Image (spheres, rainbow, N blue to C red):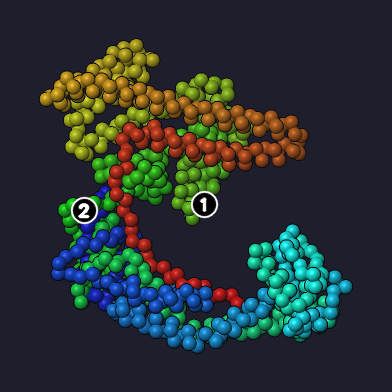
Amino acid sequence: MSLRPVPAKWFELVTAHKELAPVMACLSRTGAVELEARSRPAYRLLFPGLSDALKTYQDLARRYQQYWPSAAAAAAPHAEELSETLNAATARLTAWTARADPLIAEIETTTQAAADLARLRTALQSAGPDFPNMQMLGRAGPKLQSRLFALPVGVHLREVPALVLIRPWQTPEANYVLAVGRSSDIAEMQAQLQGLKGQTIALPSWLPASPRDAVTTIGDRLAELAERRATLAADMKALAEEFKIAAALADIALIQWLNEHAKELYGSDHLGWVTGWTSDISGDALRRALDAAGVHYILRLMDPPVGMNVPLVLHNPGWARPFEIFARMLGTPGQYESDPSAILVVIASSIFGFMFGDVGQGFLICLIGLVLGRRILLTRMLVPGGIMAIVFGFLFGSVFCRDDIVPALWIRPMEQPITVLLAAVLVGVVIMTLGLLLDALQMHWRGEASHWWMQRAGLLTAYIGLLISFFWPQGLMLAGFGAAWFILGAGVLKPEKRLTGIIEAVGQFVEQYLRLLVNTISFARIGAFALAHAGLSLAIIEMAQASGRVAYWIVLIAGNVFIIVLEGIVVSIQTTRLLLFEFFIRFLTGAGREFKPLPPPAATGAMQKQF
């Protein structure tokens, strides 16, 4: 754990050109590498034409991807030239298409036929017993034709030719129209469907006369089509296994990943040169991973080249890592800035618990954090937040909105609201002071400690002096001394423009001092929300008591759920606001560059289409 971000280390790795793919995959799995290319005159780009070589695969994917199996998830990178791997994989896909095309054509035909028959069966099931002879309708033509149109509910054909006989009926799902007439008139009606989002349902010639018998026959035909499609799916699966399509897709997925993340790497005909940044400062983890992969390499960690922007790594234990999100809202802390994540575990959780003081509700929040935290990193913040809610619940004497279960170890908010508000402001004083001290620490890191002591220490002195003046009147003298310290110190720092520096310092002091005081008073909102929580809890209890013996527990449970959901959102927002706009502005600018690890390759082949 460190209050200061750690600069990533520059690394250079040389390996055999043929082993570059497994080396890259190995580095990505460590999660400790960010690539950044650095050209040298003696080297050339390793993959200059990889994007063009992938176009054949991309063309095939647009047509056949839905018929391919998933890429082999555990495919290991090959120690061979990538061009050879890509050519071999593409050749297998191309050879597969020659055998798969007839099967795909039949699959698409049977799929469309099944969809048409399913729509026709749905329409006939609601047509009624007085429906015309289906056999005659299906065999009509060529001059006299019959068509069944399906339109959205409430939509009707705009115009029906005079010599066309129609038989309409409606269902909750569609508006159907059976039309019989001359071929030209039927074609005219069909032309209207495009603008009306309608469909034409064909009437096969093999239909029996009765609609009921037709529904039965269609069901039998659908069963035959389903059986045929299952056979075709099995044939497609066997064909994919014969040509090892899953393995080919895994090889191509790896090459696509390299093309995306490593296209700017340099090397020679026999060697590859991988450069970038690592969060593994000693390099031991990288070496262990590479040794376990059995690849040949030379790895060096060194100072970064001149002029490069070094990414920064936040080193926090697991319990503090979720709180990194607060600082990241402003950006990554710079090299000479504080990473407050570990401190926020206490500060953010205390603010949350103060506003959400209830033993029972805090226990549920903590439990939610423990359950969801296994999958969602940010929800782990609910664990310390729930613990602090339990602590303040004991201080306020509140358990699931009730105040008759445990005694208040401190006060009951609704009985002493002024005390609650003053306590919240006192919390703000501690947090503001901590922010000023972190600013002093950062200036020490930058080698500007003398500057802080010469001027900014006066701001802290004036702030503390004003606060203690409420209990010790002589504190005003200390505040005045701090103001003079800040203003006169500016003149010492600018001896060549002493008068100008002093005048500017007066304005700076007034602006910074007033903002500091306003930010401190802003923390009174913690107490206000604690009072709101207590008031809402009281209202829930009164509603429950007025609901009767049975309904009492229903109202109490529903009320607690309502408070946890509603106030959980509101309190989280207020906690974030106080941290960003009152605390962080004292010391954090977020001017650093974030370390972005190389993502591992993922097998992303399409799933087999369900026929």
Q: Position of residue 430 (x, y in %)?
A: 37, 28
Picture quarter with the C terminus = bottom right
Q: Quadrant of residue 185?
A: bottom right
Q: Secondary structure at mark 1?
A: helix
Instruction: Residue at the far top: name it.
Output: 473
Q: Is residue 476 left or right of residue 450?
A: right
Label placed on residue 372: 1
Label placed on residue 308: 2
Q: Position of residue 425 (x, y in %)?
A: 43, 25
Residue plotted at (43% across, 82% down): 93
Residue plotted at (40% across, 34% down): 581
51 vs 546: above or below: below
Q: What is the three-letter code of the residue carrying label 2?
A: Met
Q: Give the alpha-carbon distance from disc 1 to disc 2, as whole Å.
A: 40 Å
Q: What is the three-letter code of the residue carrying label 1?
A: Leu
Residue plotted at (19% across, 64% down): 39
Mark 1, other Cα within 10 Å: few <14 / some 14–19 / many ≥20 = some
Q: Is residue 166 left or right of residue 114?
A: right
Mark 2, other Cα within 10 Å: few <14 / some 14–19 / many ≥20 = few
Q: Nearer the viewer, residue 84 or 519?
A: 84
Q: Secondary structure at mark 2?
A: loop
Could you tell me how many numbered marks the image carries? 2
Q: Nearer the viewer, residue 374 or 193?
A: 193
**Residue 150 visible in the picture:** yes
Q: Position of residue 370 (x, y in %)?
A: 51, 49
Instruction: Residue at the far front: name it.
Output: 162
**Residue 486 visible in the picture:** no
293 vs 400: above or below: below
Q: Earlier in the sequence, mark 1 or mark 2?
A: 2
* Whether label 1 touches label 2, CB < 8 Å: no
390 vs 188: above or below: above
Residue plotted at (85% across, 70% down): 128
